[in-house]
Amino acid sequence: MKILITGTAGFIGFHLAQKLLARGDEVVGLDSINDYYDIRVKHGRLAETGINSDQVQYGQMVQSTKHENYRFVQLKLEDKAELDALFEREQFDAVCNLAAQAGVRYSLEHPQAYIDANIVGFLNILEACRHFGVKNLSYASSSSVYGLNETLPFSTSHNVDHPISLYAASKKSNELMAHTYSHLFGIHTTGLRFFTVYGPWGRPDMALFLFTKAALEGRTIDVFNNGNMLRDFTYVDDIVEGITRVIDNPAQPATDWIEKGADASRSSAPYKVYNIGNNNPVKLMDFITAIENAVGKEIPKNLMPLQAGDVPATFADVTDLVEDLGYKPSTSVQDGINKFVAWYRDFFKC
C-alpha cells in the first residue's frame, strides 16, 4: 500500500514507519517538527530512517537515503492548502494520523496548541480523505479520554464524557469527528486509545525518559501521587503491531448494531475504536524499580501529590482487539525498559 503516516518524527510514528517500510509498503512521512521537546531526538529519528535534517525545508519532499520507498515532508496539519495538495498529488491508499500536540500537563498552560493541531489539524485530515478518495483512516486517540471513569479495566463500551484535560477532550473530539465522516462519507475510521507507550526513541517528556535521565545524572525524581499510580505500560513494538493490523483491516459497519444501549466503540457506519495496551497494569514504584535494575543504581525520590489532569490508574481491556485482530502484547516491562536504557546510553553517549 501507499500509506501516509503523520507524526513520523515522533515516537510511535517513527517506529510504525520502520515496520511498514520493512514489509515493503510505500510510506510518506509527515511531521511539523515542533520544539515541544528536545529537537535532537526528533532529528535523530529522522536520521535513523535516512532523512537528513539539513535537507528538510517546509513543504518540500525529501527522499530517504536508506529506503527507496520512503519520503518525508515537513508540514503542519493546520496548513490545509499544503495538506490538500499533498493528498491530491500522492493519492494514498491509507492514512495513519499519529501527529498531535501531546501531553496532559502541557495542555493546562497551552490550550490553543491542542485546538490547532488536534482539532483543526484532524478536521483537515478528514476533509482531505473525503475529497481525495482515501477510505482507510486510522488515528491516535488516548487512554486519557476515560477521565473520571474509575471502573477498571477501561472498556471501549464505558462512558467517556467526563475528560479532565483539554488534551483528553481533543482526543474524544477526534473520535466524534471520525464517526461523523464515517457516517456521512463512508470513510473507514479506526481510533486507537493508546495506553502509556514506552521504548527506545521515546518522548523526553515521559516518565521513563525523565527517570532514566535523572538516574544517570544522579538527580532526584518527582514521583506523583506518592507513587500510588497504576499504568498499563505498553512497549512500542507491541503498539506498532496493533496499528499495523488495524491498517490492514479497516473498520467495517456493525450489522447487528442498534442505537439504544449500543456499544459506543462501533456503529452502523464503518467506524471502530479500540483500546491498545498491555492489559497488565504496573505500579509506578515497580516501574521505577525496573529502571533502577536497568541502570544499576537506586534513584532518589521526591514524593508528590497527584497532579491536575492526571488519573490515578489506567488498565486497558483489549478483548475486542484480541478477538477481531489477534492482537496480543508480549513484551515484559523489565525487557522493554532494558531496551530503552540501552538505546538511551547509546544515543546520549552516557
Image (cartoon, rainbow, N blue to C red):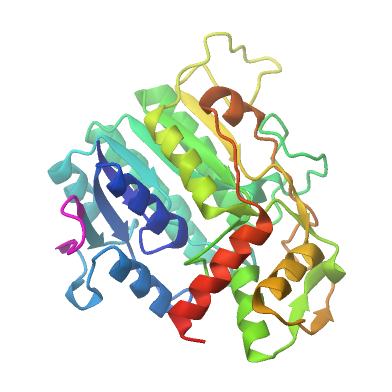
In the image, which residues are magenta? 60-70
In which quarter of the view is residue 337 placed? Answer: bottom right
Q: Residue furthest bottom?
A: 218
At a point 57% along the width and 72% down the height, the residue shown is 341
- Of residue 71 and residue 98, the one placed in the foreground of this image is 71
> What x and y, as percent, mark residue 112?
50, 65
Magenta stretch encompasses residue 182? no
Q: Estimate the x, y position of residue 174 in percent, counting from the top left.
A: 50, 43
Say if residue 204 shows up in the picture.
Answer: no
Residue lying at 82% horizontally and 44% vertically, measured from the top left: 150
**Tag count in the figure?**
0
- In the rendering, at what x and y percent does residue 23 appear? 30, 42
**91 to the left or right of 314:** left
- Residue 216 lies in what quarter of the image? bottom right
In the rendered view, does 169 fall on the left or right side of 303?
left
Q: How far across and how far down the image is residue 248, in percent?
A: 38, 31
Query: In which quadrant is the N terminus drawn?
Result: top left
Q: Which one is in front, 302 or 67? A: 67
* 69 drawn magenta: yes
Query: In percent of the image, x 25 and y 75: which residue is there?
Result: 53
Q: Main secondary structure of the magenta part?
A: loop
Q: Is residue 342 visible?
A: yes
Q: Is residue 255 left or right of residue 42?
A: right
Q: Is residue 47 above or below residue 263?
A: below
At 53% from the left and 36% from the top, the residue drawn is: 176
Is residue 105 found left or right of 282 in the rendered image? left
